[in-house]
Image (cartoon, rainbow, N blue to C red):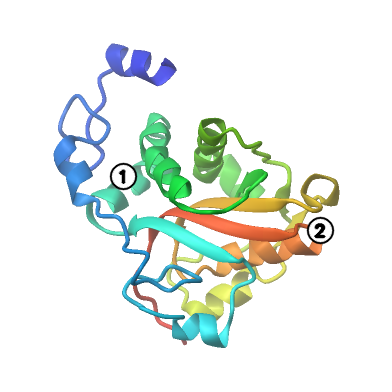
Amino acid sequence: FFWIAMDWLYPPSCAGCGKNGERLCHSCLQQITPIDHQTSCPRCDLPHANHLCPDCQSQPPVFEQLRSYSVYDGCLRRAIHQLKYENDLPLADTLCRFLISLFAEQNWQVNLICPVPLSQQRLRQRGYNQSALLAQILGWAVSIPCSKKALYRIRETRSQVGLNAVQRRENVKGAFSAVPSIVQNKTVLVVDDIATTSATLSACAEALKSAGASQVFAITLARTVQIEQS
């Protein structure tokens, strides 16, 4: 209701096409096609894999399963960019509807939600963590506790942008830690905006399981389709 009131006072423009009056217009929403999970990798949700993808066979992720709503392209890509870099915080409410719908399709018995944490440096620069916004809204919607303290970074990492799959895994290796008193014996859902190689999500899962989490699932708005492996 807060964001509805804000939209009435300050009419938004569509993050996909710029049309006035809506955060994401009907036309742009129709262009965001859900991933067909029947034909994606059953572990990391890589689209059109039809079976366990080569990367999950050679470097199995630590999490049990990742599900993403759609491919990182077009209107969804522009909307995520606006949320992430343009301070368009109300857009988290709109985009999280995709996560709510996606979560409802899964058979995960989750009892704790946590976002992928930003480094302190990036948090100071950006002023907010877009994944934490998504995680909190999802938690409210599905009545599952969300903790921003359960998982945290213990060292700075360079941006994953421009790195290949091997470099991404090395970049985030050992970068996270978790609080045993919060996560022990819990089935945890990790929330992020985009999954590329899923290296960050796997590193988060490793930290959570090291702290006693029993299972870790992951959910993102978008999934990239291709990235150089080496």
For image coordinates 39% across by 38% down, the residue present is 97
**Residue 205: image x %, image y %?**
66, 62
Which quarter of the image is occupied by the N terminus?
A: top left
Calculate the distance from the C-alpha at mark 1 to the C-alpha at mark 2.
34 Å
Residue at 42% x, 49% y is: 102
Task: Give percent across and percent down for residue 58.
Answer: 55, 88
Q: Nearer the viewer, residue 222 or 167?
A: 222
Q: Considering only vertical position in the picture, is 84 above or below 66?
A: above
Q: Which mark is residue 79?
A: 1
- The residue that label 2 is drawn on is 211
Q: Amino acid at mark 2?
A: Ala
> SS of the residue at dot 1?
helix
Q: Give the quadrant of residue 8.
A: top left
Report the amino acid beneath label 1. Ala
Assess whether mark 2 and mark 1 are in contact (beta carbons under 8 angstroms): no
Q: Nearer the viewer, residue 61 or 80?
A: 61
Q: Is residue 159 visible?
A: no
* Residue lying at the far front of the rendered structure: 107
User: Farthest residue in the right direction?
Assistant: 181
Give the secondary structure at mark 2.
loop
Residue 189 appears left or right of 52? right
Q: Tell me: 187 left or right of 43.
A: right
Image point (46%, 80%), residue name: 52
In front of the other: label 1 or label 2? 2
Q: Residue at x 79, y 53 (%)?
A: 185
Total number of numbered discs in the rendering: 2
How packed mark 2 is, by other alpha carbons closer than 10 Å (few <14, some 14-19, many 20 or more), is: many
